Amino acid sequence: MLPSSFSIAGTATSANVIGIMSDQGHGDKVFIKLNKPIDNSPDCYTNSIWSFVLPIETELTKKTLFSMLLTAYSAQKPITVIGYGTCDTHNGIETLRRIELK
């Protein structure tokens, strides 16, 4: 049985968000910088500045994931994040799939 992309995706556990960036030149995307390295990064991940990229294209990402990200950043609460295992939203940066705020 082949592993799913979710099982080989990059993860960071109990990480703090130390940077968030959005730029009109990059479209509807939010770039996220964490305070710790990502485990199991996919081969496509080559960016040393940003940890993940979150496309802001759906109601889920606009209202839920982005809100959770801002809450974690503002309160400096640790989160667990998991990517898709692909860099299809922005070249060299893994696309964010999941945020766990505890």
Image: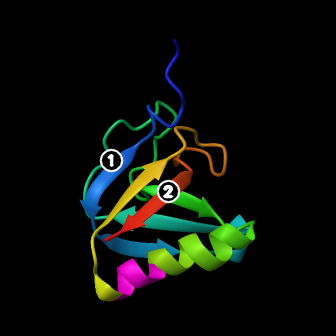
Q: Amino acid at mark 2?
A: Arg
The prevailing secondary structure element of the residues shown in magenta is helix
CA distance separating discs 1 and 2: 14 Å
Q: In x, y percent, where is residue 31?
A: 52, 65
Image position of 75 with respect to 29: above or below: below
Residue furthest out toward the top? 1
Question: Image point 41% across, 42% down: which residue?
Answer: 10
Residue at the bottom extreme of this rendering: 74
**Which circle, 1 or 2, is nearer the viewer?**
2
Kindly indicate the quadrant of the structure image that contains residue 71. bottom left
In the rendered view, tell whether residue 86 sits above or below residue 12: above
Please report the bounds of the magenta region as a residue range.
Answer: 70-74
Q: Residue 10: say if magenta.
A: no
* Residue 22 seen in this snapshot: no
Which of the two labelled residues, at mark 1 and mark 2, occupies the earlier sequence position? 1
Instruction: Examine the rendered structure and indicate whether residue 61 appears above or below residue 45.
Output: below
Marking on residue 14: none
- Mark 2, secondary structure of its residue: strand
Local crowd size for mark 1, using a 10 Å CA cut-off: few (<14), some (14–19), many (≥20): some
Residue 20 picture location, percent across and down: 47, 75
Percent position of residue 53, x then y: 55, 59
Q: Circle 1 is placed at which residue position? A: 38
Residue type, mark 1 in image: Ile
- Residue that numbered label 2 is attached to: 98
Q: Nearer the viewer, residue 37 or 1?
A: 1
For image coordinates 74% across by 67% down, the residue present is 58
Residue 11, horizontal then vertical, whole percent: 37, 47
- Residue at 52% in and 35% down: 44
Q: Which quadrant holds residue 59?
A: bottom right
Of helix, strand and loop, which one carries label 1? loop
